Amino acid sequence: KPTIGVLAVQGSFAEHIDSLQKLDVNCLEIRQKSDLTDHQLQGIILPGGESTVMGKLLQELDLFADLKHRIENGLPVLGTCAGLILLAKAIANDPNVYLGTMDIVAKRNAYGRQLGSFSAQGSFAEMGEIPMTFIRAPFIESASKYVEILAKIDGHIVAAKQDNMVVTSFHPELSADLSVHRYFLNLCE
Ligand code: GLN
């Protein structure tokens, strides 16, 4: 069984763990540095939440350097919503850069702050049509040629992959559909 770490400092980590448990993997909550350094992980999930809060907590817990190092060395990572923002090389409407490992420009709260929550059906990679839940979601405003686009909604990129990094602006952990987690676990093997 692979062991997948789920960053568990803030946001929808419990729902990711629920999804992973349906797929017969070991989950490890990442709450401090030793969780990351003392375990063999086959992948890691950065959940949705609030990127500014997560950034602050990652800073306080001194987790940035280790996380970035592991990702740059090929550890598969799935970043959903705020997790996408953490991975982006730049944020169009925010001066912060967090891990900055993925060649995308993210736009925060890209659908507006109040009416920003909605569901859609869209095709994701080779997995077919899946439900997509957006909550004050970012989208990918631009991506370099190294980035593979996995899904678009209304012309905006909402899922993408670059090497070991997969991101979605929607919340796959909030629907019963496990396609995105399955897709990610394939990458972790
Ligand atoms: N709006 C949040 C942010 O900018 C992301 C929303 C989410 O993760 N559901 O961090």
Image (cartoon, helix red, strand yellow):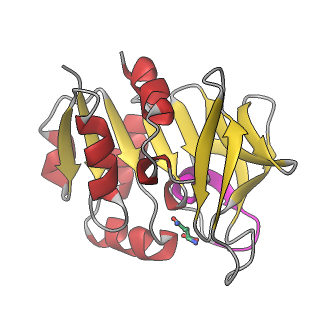
* Position of residue 68 in the picture relative to residue 127 (left or right): left
Query: Which range of residues does the magenta coloring cover?
Result: 84-95
Q: How many marks?
A: 0
Would you place residue 163 above or below residue 21 in this image?
above
Residue for point 39% across, 25% down: 185
Q: Quadrant of the N terminus?
A: top left
Q: Residue 55, located in which quarter of the rendered image?
A: bottom left
Residue situated furthest right in the rendering: 155
* Position of residue 162 in the picture relative to residue 5 (left or right): right
Residue 72 horizontal/vertical position (percent): 47, 34
In this rendered view, identify the residue nearer to me: 174 or 96: 174
Q: Quadrant of the C terminus?
A: top left
Residue 53 horizontal/vertical position (percent): 42, 76
* Position of residue 99 in the picture relative to residue 34 (left or right): right
Would you place residue 17 above or below residue 178 in this image?
below
Magenta stretch contains residue 87: yes
Residue situated furthest top in the rendering: 189
Q: For ligand 1, which image quadrant applies?
A: bottom right
Would you place residue 189 above or below residue 110 in this image?
above
Residue for point 73% across, 28% down: 146
Residue for point 51% across, 28% down: 164
Residue 42 horizontal/vertical position (percent): 29, 26
Residue 177 horizontal/vertical position (percent): 47, 38
Residue for point 55% across, 57% down: 81
Magenta stretch contains residue 175: no
